[in-house]
Image: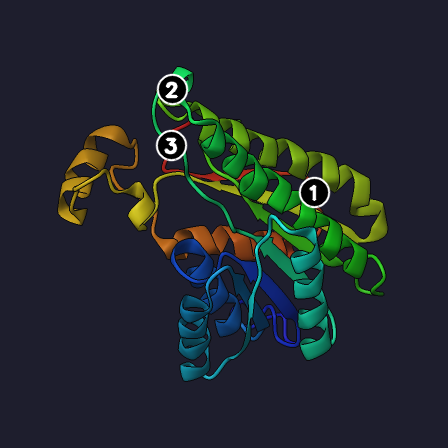
Amino acid sequence: MSTTAHHRFTGRSVLVTGAGSGIGRALALAFAAEGASVTVAGRTAAPLAETVALIERAGGTALAVTADVSSSDEVRALVARAVERFGSLDVAVNNAGVFRGGGPIAELPEADWHTLLDVNVTGVLHALQAETAQMRGQETGGAIVNVSSNLGAHARRPGLAAYAASKAAVSALTRGAALDHIGDGVRINAVSPGASDTGMSLLPGESEAERAVRMKEQSPLGRVSSLDEVAAAVLYLASDAAASVVGTDLVVDGGASA
């Protein structure tokens, strides 16, 4: 198996949830470019098919599976499909998440709160359980990276308390799970991006050019993080180079929460 910088995942099976767009799609493409066979998952078939097409067009191998991470049955079936197709599950990236409830906490709709918990927290729990069940039975174990956010354990913003609470839970769950399962050969970490080059970092009605001007004032780095920069952090934590990195939460936000 090649372990060069450009082929760190040759021969490995990688699962990425929330892979129909944004960071998830960028992660799937990055793993495939480094030799992985990638299972891409999400709730909607069409964008997943687009991700697979992009990977295959570049010469990679991918499988699309529709799954809702808030359902433990669907997540178990997702892992089973990945293993059936590619023979193992060596890396999993739990990226699926939603944003709800922008506004003061006193006015937060209860349905938004439950959606945040169901997807952002319970969804990660379901994924961790299904993935570790598979990985700890493999001779080579596995690596899991949860995608959290700099909003939560690292920073807070007015009007985003509910979302921050859900992502803080992801950070805590990651560290606890890492301690529970490193003895099983399963290495678990998190990456917490800040404002990145996706639609989620745009204010309502804001253009990318207007966002660039705003970020010059709001970010110590002076810009959003590129998707390649976020992917680089995730791939590092999933790689053999991070073999002794356990339970970390790597913040990629240009210094916004420093």
| Residue 13 sits in quarter | bottom right
Q: Mark 2 = which residue?
A: 107
Q: Position of residue 163 (x, y in %)?
A: 46, 31
Q: Amino acid at mark 2?
A: Glu
The dot on residue 204 is none
The reply to whether callout 1 and callout 3 are in contact (CB within 8 Å) is no
Q: CA distance from mark 2 to mark 3?
A: 30 Å
Q: Residue at x 72, y 68 (%)?
A: 80
Quarter of the image that includes the N terminus? bottom right
Badge 2 density bin: few <14, some 14–19, many ≥20, Cα 10 Å: few
The number of numbered badges drawn on the structure is: 3
Mark 3 lies on a secondary structure that is loop
Q: Which residue is mark 1?
A: 246
Q: Is residue 214 left or right of residue 99?
A: left
The three-letter amino acid code for the residue at tag 3 is Gly
Q: Residue at x 51, y 38 (%)?
A: 115
Residue 104: image location, x then y, percent: 36, 19
Q: Give the mark nearest the N terminus, 1 or 2.
A: 2
Disc 1/disc 2 C-alpha distance (Å)? 38 Å
Q: Decide: is 162 above or below 234.
A: above
Q: Look at discs 2 and 3 and give the one toward the viewer.
A: 2
Check the image and report above or below for 165 versus 126.
above
**Residue bearing mark 3:** 255
Provide the secondary structure element on which disc 1 rests.
loop
Which x, y percent locates residue 136?
82, 57
Disc 3 packing (10 Å; few <14; some 14–19; many ≥20): few
- Which image quadrant: the C terminus? top left
